[in-house]
């Protein structure tokens, strides 16, 4: 089944023409309505009329997460605030997140691309979709929610966590499609096994997994243990949320909804556009978004684009699964964490040397983050007399910076490795 055959199967020529028209339109709107873009275009001496072909996109400036943070909270909106009817923020932290604003039309686009994505996983009106992505500012929950309702399937808006309840509902309601992060899917499988719940007795047919990096090996493991077809969904808050790209049953890459999001691959060092098939950083331009158009957003995600024919009949360009990042961003249980945020939290603590190391592990398929910090005499005061108190105080500081509980362990002064070059702050032991 294809949700929107006209859009998803149009000829390459038709698609290119549509993309060009939409690109010209979005560039014009960004110039006219977003002071940030007007300034950037003027600096580069670009007029909206300069976009005559799709290749001319290369003349346009990039947008980065930092640009969006500087425009916090609403500086990138292209419509008056009363036309924005929903906001989300990147799954990060209590620091300055990036905000995404949606007009009525943007929510329709989001519902449409999510309906396409869920249809790729075989969803139709009859399905029960158990949505275990978090509801809230994170886009996972509501993105799947809108797509499910667009299709007319039944959404079970259970949100993330509460594993026993997830399993109970899965059995009682006869859930046919589960949506969550791949690591949580494996955790669900593990708990199900411990509880004596047999996968073959569940009604699950597919899983829509994303929001973090995962591998082909993990896919096989999840498919075997949950007895379903595990499909990869990709997206990011800045662009719209989940639904930017999704795998079909062919499982040879993710179809990008390229009538709404225009992809390019660049070399992250030279910033030059790379030819099709080469691995580099994914750059995305929103072609239809009204509330917050984004031109050439540097995702920092590493992948390659492929313009091959797909057995499913969809003609959109496909991207490989994400294999890495150009920066040190981590996703811990779906939440974005930058090591610099941990450093910032540590620096706020008087008497603490910011000598630290972050160890990421995945015991029982759930991410754990341990921060090792060197102790010092100066850390202890009238209030903080014992190691346990010091640990808790540091954990609280990190919690208020990240919105995430981590384990802190205090190690001997001078015991963490010193580096002459770039410090190795993160040891990621998860096998991603
Ligand atoms: O993670 C949106 C989403 C929700 C996608 C649910 C899929 C399912 P952010 O929190 O803004 O948005 O994080 C975006 O997560 O730049 C990637 O680094 C990573 N990411 C998302 N999907 C995948 C995936 C949501 N399938 C950032 N594979 C992106 C690898 C992914 N990484």
Image (spheres, grey):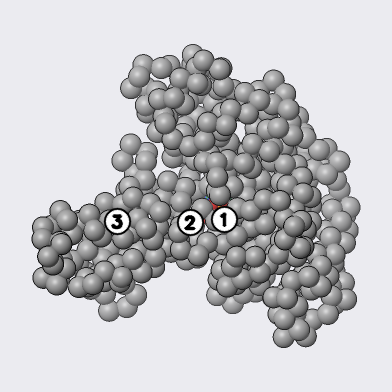
The image quarter in which residue 136 lies: top right
- The residue carrying mark 2 is 92
User: Residue 325 versus residue 79: which sits nearer the camera?
Assistant: 79
Q: Residue at x 77, y 34 (%)?
A: 2
For marks 1 and 2, give the CA distance. Answer: 8 Å
Residue 21 in sight from this viewpoint:
yes
- Pointer 1 local density, CA inside 10 Å: few below 14, some 14–19, many at least 20: many
Q: Nearer the viewer, residue 178 or 111?
A: 111
Given this view, does label 3 or label 2 mark the residue nearer the observer? Answer: 3
Label 1 beta carbon within 8 A of ligand 1: no
Q: Is residue 317 visible?
A: no
How many marks are shown on the rendered structure?
Answer: 3
**Could you say which disc has been placed on residue 396 in the image?**
3
- Secondary element at image label 2: loop
Q: Nearer the viewer, mark 1 or mark 3?
A: 3
Quarter assignment of residue 174 = top right
Secondary element under disc 3, as helix, strand or loop, is helix
Q: Which mark is residue 89?
A: 1
Residue 84 sits above or below residue 26 on the image: above
- Tell me the quadrant of the picture where the N terminus can be found: top right
* Residue occupying the point 73% across, 27% down: 152
Q: Is residue 268 left or right of residue 329?
A: right
403 up-or-down from 338: above or below:
above
Sequence order check: which comes first, mark 1 or mark 3? 1
Mark 3: few, some, or many residues within 10 Å (few <14, many ≥20)?
some
Q: Percent position (x, y) of residue 386? A: 10, 58
State yes or no: discs 3 and 2 in contact (Cβ < 8 Å): no
Depth order, front residue of 45/408: 408
- Which SS class for mark 1? strand
- Image marks 1 and 2: residues in contact by CB distance under 8 Å: yes
């Amino acid at each position: 089944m294809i949700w929107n055959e006209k859009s998803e199967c149009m000829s390459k020529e038709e698609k290119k023409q549509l993309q060009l028209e939409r690109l010209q339109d979005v560039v014009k709107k960004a110039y006219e309505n977003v002071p940030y873009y007007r300034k950037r275009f003027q600096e580069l001496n670009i007029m909206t009329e300069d976009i005559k072909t799709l290749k001319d996109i290369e003349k346009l400036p990039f947008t980065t997460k930092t640009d969006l943070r500087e425009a916090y909270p609403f500086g990138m909106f292209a419509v008056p605030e009363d036309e924005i009817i929903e906001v989300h923020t990147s799954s990060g932290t209590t620091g300055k997140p990036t905000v995404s604003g949606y007009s009525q039309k943007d929510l329709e686009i989001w519902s449409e691309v999510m309906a396409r994505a869920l249809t790729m996983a075989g969803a139709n009106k009859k399905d029960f979709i158990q949505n275990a992505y978090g509801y809230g500012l994170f886009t996972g929950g509501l993105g799947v929610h809108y797509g499910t309702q667009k299709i007319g399937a039944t959404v079970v808006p259970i949100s993330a966590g509460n594993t026993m309840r997830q399993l109970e509902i899965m059995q009682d309601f006869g859930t046919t499609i589960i949506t969550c992060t791949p690591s949580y899917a494996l955790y669900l499988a593990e708990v199900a096994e411990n509880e004596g719940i047999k996968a073959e007795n569940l009604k699950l047919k597919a899983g829509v997994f994303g929001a973090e990096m995962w591998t082909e090996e993990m896919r096989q493991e999840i498919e075997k243990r949950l007895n379903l077809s595990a499909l990869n969904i990709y997206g990011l808050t800045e662009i719209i949320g989940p639904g930017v790209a999704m795998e079909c049953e062919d499982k040879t890459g993710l179809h990008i909804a390229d009538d709404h999001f225009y992809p390019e691959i660049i070399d992250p060092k030279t910033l030059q556009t790379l030819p099709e098939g080469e691995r580099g950083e994914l750059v995305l331009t929103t072609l239809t978004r009204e509330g917050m158009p984004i031109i050439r957003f540097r995702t920092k995600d590493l992948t390659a684009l492929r313009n091959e024919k797909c057995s499913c009949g969809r003609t959109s360009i496909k991207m490989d699964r994400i294999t890495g990042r150009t920066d040190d961003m981590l996703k811990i249980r779906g939440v974005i964490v930058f090591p610099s945020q941990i450093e910032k939290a540590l620096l706020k603590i008087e008497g603490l040397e910011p000598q630290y190391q972050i160890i990421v592990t995945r015991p029982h398929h759930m991410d754990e983050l341990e921060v090792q910090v060197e102790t010092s005499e100066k850390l202890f005061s009238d209030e903080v007399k014992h190691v346990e108190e010091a640990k808790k105080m540091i954990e609280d500081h990190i919690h208020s910076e990240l919105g995430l509980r981590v384990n802190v362990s205090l190690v001997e002064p001078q015991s963490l490795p010193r580096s002459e070059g770039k410090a190795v702050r993160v040891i990621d032991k998860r096998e991603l």
